[in-house]
Amino acid sequence: MGCDPVSDELIGKYLEKRIIWEKDGAEMVLIPAGSFEMGDQNITYADPVHSVKLDAFYMDVREVTVKQFKEFVQESGYVYHHWDDVPKYSPTDQHPMIYVDWYQAMEYAKWAGKRLPTEAEWEYAARGGLVKKQYPWGDEIGHDNANYAGASGKDIWDQQTAPVGSFDPNGYGLYDMAGNVHEWCLDAFDQNFYSRSSRKNPLAGHSSIEEVVSNYKDVVSGRVLRGGSWTYSKCYVSVAYRDYGNTDHRFSSGGFRCVLGSVDSLSSE
């Protein structure tokens, strides 16, 4: 079994459903409701492979940039102490924001009126409608596809992040779903979660999305990271590879993107 088949016509339909989110200026795309086979039996902690059904949601087309995070800090008055660290690996406003821990990513998402994706939403979106593939575009990867450890071809960023959107998007129009920066998810990291995961809109460690979003300041357990990064070799930027970090962990390859979990109020877009 694999993902439900997604035709070129259907993908094209959803690629037209784009919005610009006014609060942070992010371009977002509608990810269609559907089901897919989550996980990979050949990856540690990513088995068993299991069927998951998800509601539709909007996702940021690109990772949150340095510019967007600066605007959040300036407008909200949020105190951020690590600006001296960011330029070494994300030197311009168009590079992804890094050195943000999970709480800071949640603060940004709250300010923007969005949230972080669940782990299942992230993987489903990263697959871009493809069935049983290792990467957002197929089973092979090269430096013309993504920014990961090393450099050649389009990937000229050996020791830092690439500006967001420097490589071709996947089937849903999402950029950098492999490599560049690790992306925070809502879920607690549970290495055995796949064996007992809910089959619809799963979330590890909490009874509901609303519960974790409302009480995120009280969260202490490690959180899921997805996508690999510019520091990781190609086998670790697979769509199914699971990583994690402590909620207060900030690092040179850690960033995020946001989602809108309900499309009802935006159906007229």
Image: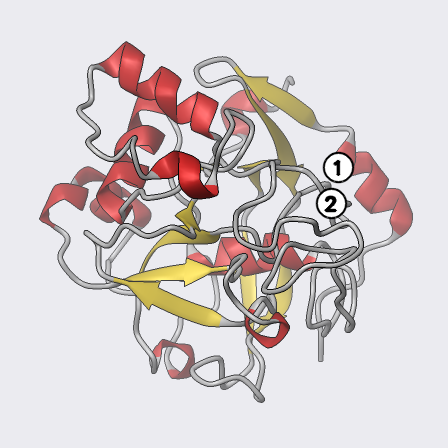
Of residue 195 and residue 143, the one placed in the foreground of this image is 143
Q: Is residue 231 visible?
A: yes
Residue at 41 percent across and 34 percent down: it is 87
Q: With 174 as the anchor, is 227 left or right in this view?
A: left
Question: What is the basis of the colouring in this image?
Answer: secondary structure
Of residue 10 and residue 244, the one placed in the foreground of this image is 244
Whole-percent x, y for residue 202 in the image: 41, 62
Residue at 76 percent across and 35 percent down: it is 15
Mark 2 sits on what residue? 167
Does 260 sit above or below residue 251? above
Q: With 242 as the anchor, is 263 left or right in this view?
A: right
Q: Furthest-left residue in view?
A: 218
Task: Tell me the SS state at disc 2.
Answer: loop
Of residue 86 and residue 268, the one placed in the foreground of this image is 86
Q: With 209 as the anchor, is 22 left or right in this view?
A: right
**Mark 2: few/some/many CA within 10 Å (<14, 14-19, 20+):** some
Q: Earlier in the sequence, mark 1 or mark 2?
A: 1
Of residue 125 and residue 151, the one placed in the foreground of this image is 151
Q: Is residue 203 visible?
A: no
**Mark 1: few/some/many CA within 10 Å (<14, 14-19, 20+):** some
Q: Which is closer to the viewer, label 1 or label 2?
A: 2
**How far apart, in angstroms, are the residues tagged by discs 1 and 2?**
20 Å
Q: Quarter holding the N terminus?
A: bottom right
Whole-percent x, y for residue 115 in the image: 37, 37
Does 220 sit above or below residue 268? below
Residue at 29 percent across and 33 percent down: it is 84
Mark 1 sits on what residue? 14
| Type of the residue with mark 2 | Phe
| Mark drawn on residue 83 | none
Task: Tell me the SS state at disc 1.
Answer: helix
